[in-house]
Amino acid sequence: MADLIENVSDTAFWIAHYRALESQRSDALFRDPLAGFLAGDRGKDIAQSMPKWFATNWAVVIRTCIIDDYIRSAISEGVDMVLNLGAGLDTRPYRMDLPNSLVWIEADYPDVIAFKQKRLSDENPRCQLERIKLDLAKVPERRQMLASINARAKKLLILTEGVLPYLSVEDVASLADDLRALDHARYWIVDYFSPHVIKFRQRLLGKRMQNAPFKFKPEDWFGFFEAHRWHLREIRYLMEEGDRLHRPMRLPMLLKIVSIIRMCFVSKERRAALRRFAGYAILVPE
C-alpha cells in the first residue's frame, strides 16, 4: 500500500488519526475532538497499512504532550505569536487553553490550507488564528512571509513539528538561517531523530514511505544547529518523557522479550543512547 502516502502532506492524516485514538481513551493525556474529523477514513487507512503501528501511535502521543508543554511555557514567558510552519492538520488553536490575544499563524501548502479551512469553517479557535498558503521550498516567498510576520511579533515562537525530517540538510540550513535573521524570533521547536532510528525507519517503512522519505541526516544534529546560531535550550526524549507521564511504549509480548534479551548484551552507555532515539527540542537564537 505504498501509494497511500503520495506526498508528505498525506502524513498529516496519519498523525491526526493517532491523536484521535488517544482522545478516545479514558486516561487520555490530551483531548483533540477535531482530530478524527480531520483524519477521516484516509488517516485510518494509512495507519492500518503501517507495520508496528503501536510505536508510531505512542510516539505521536508523547510528542504532542512535549510540544504542548513547550508552547505553554513559551507563552508564560511572553510569546505573543506562534508561527506553525507545515502546520498540517494540527488543531492546537482549537483545543489548547490559549490567550485570546495570542496570534497563531499556520502556513502550509495551498491544498492543505484549503482542506482545513473548509473542514473547520464552523469551529471557533481560542486565539487569533490566521492561515497562509505557502510552499516553504519557494525561498523568496518564504522570506517575504517571514519578514512580514517578524514585523508584527514582539516575541515569536516557531513550530516545525514533523517538518524538518522531510527536508534536505541544505534546505534545513537555509530555513535555519532565515529564521535566525528574524530579530523577534525567541524559540524554535524541532524534531530530533538519531541516525539509528532513521535507519530503522527506512528498513521498516521504506516502501510505504518512498514518496515521503526522511532526508535530514546531518552528521552531528546538535552541531548543525549550533553552526547556524541556534542553541539547544531543552530537549525531551520520547522514552524518558513516556516514563515521566506513566505512558511507556507497550510492546507485544514476543517483541518485548526479544528486546529485553538484546539489552542484556549491550553496554550501559549503549542502552542509554538507545533510550534517546528521538525527541523534541526547543532552540533559542544565539
Image: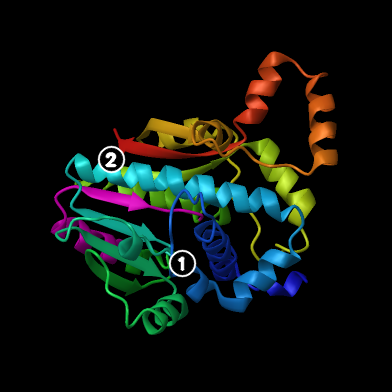
Q: Could you tell me which quadrant the N terminus lies in?
A: bottom right
Q: Quadrant of residue 97?
A: bottom left
Check if residue 113 falls in the magenta segment.
no
The residue beneath circle 2 is 73
> Residue 84: x and y, percent?
36, 59
Q: Secondary structure at mark 1?
A: loop
Q: Quadrant of residue 265?
A: top right
Instruction: Please tell me whether residue 108 is drawn above or below residue 96 in the rendered image.
Output: below
Check if residue 149 falls in the magenta segment.
yes
**C-alpha gap between disc 1 and disc 2:** 23 Å
Q: Residues within 10 Å of mark 1 (few under 14, many from 20)?
A: many
Q: Which of label 1 and label 2 is nearer to you?
A: 2
The residue beneath circle 1 is 88
Mark with earlier residue (1, 2)? 2
Q: Nearer the viewer, residue 103 or 64?
A: 64
The answer to whether residue 106 shows anywhere in this view is: yes
Residue sitting at the far top: 268
